[in-house]
Amino acid sequence: MDIQNTQSQMRKGVLEFCILSIIKQGEVYPSDIVDKMKGANLQILEGTLYPLLTRLKNAGYLTYRWVESNSGPPRKYFLMTDQGLQFYAELERTWKELAEAVQTLTAQNDEPVSPEQTPNNNQ
């Protein structure tokens, strides 16, 4: 089994939630999302980000506005819709439940297991 593939899949599983967490803080330009993700040690490529933003916009969770730029073409700034805020609240609830469950299970790994506790102990 390839550890890098497993790690990548774990990151992809929380990517949408992390991106929405950033946008929930206020209107944001995609390169700012990339910078904030990198600052949190979560790498994301623009080739991954833009399709995800489009999918979230098409689902009604995001909207955007164009802002003229002095140094090039207009920029698209994203912000969350009311529907997106509701979706985010559900994701946040799910994340907290999942994180708590994982914490509970991984904390149990710190406790020694006696042979009596081992399932399917062929005696």
Image (cartoon, rainbow, N blue to C red):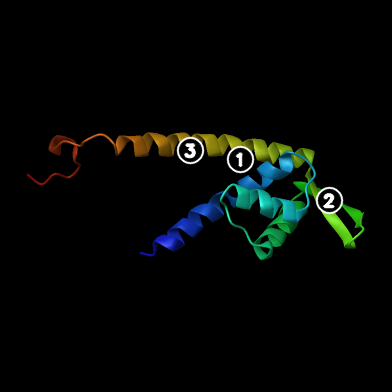
Foreground disc of the pair 3, 1: 3
Left or right, 3 with respect to 58, comes to: left
Residue 8 visible in the current orientation:
yes
Q: SS class of the residue under badge 1?
A: helix
Residue 79 % position (x, y): 79, 45
Left or right, 2 with respect to 54, comes to: left
Q: Quadrant of residue 115?
A: top left
Q: In the rendered structure, which amino acid carries the disc numbered 3?
A: Ala
Q: Residues within 10 Å of mark 1 (few under 14, many from 20)?
A: some
Mark 2 or 1, nearer chain start:
2
Residue to which mark 2 is pinned: 64
Residue to which mark 3 is pinned: 99
The quadrant of the image that shows the N terminus is bottom left
Foreground disc of the pair 2, 1: 2
Which residue is depicted at the point 70% across and 51% down?
A: 33
Q: Are marks 3 and 1 in contact (CB under 8 Å)?
A: no
Residue 25 % position (x, y): 73, 38
Q: SS class of the residue under badge 2?
A: strand
Which residue is depicted at the point 25% across and 34% down?
A: 111
Residue to which mark 1 is pinned: 91
Up/down of 111 relative to 22, above or below: above
Up/down of 42 relative to 25, above or below: below
Using the numbered discs, state the Cα–Cα distance from disc 3 to disc 1 in whole angstroms.
12 Å
Residue 68 % position (x, y): 93, 56
Using the numbered discs, state the Cα–Cα distance from disc 2 to disc 1 in whole angstroms.
21 Å
User: Can you name the residue that lies furthest to the left here?
Assistant: 123
Mark 3 or 2, nearer chain start:
2
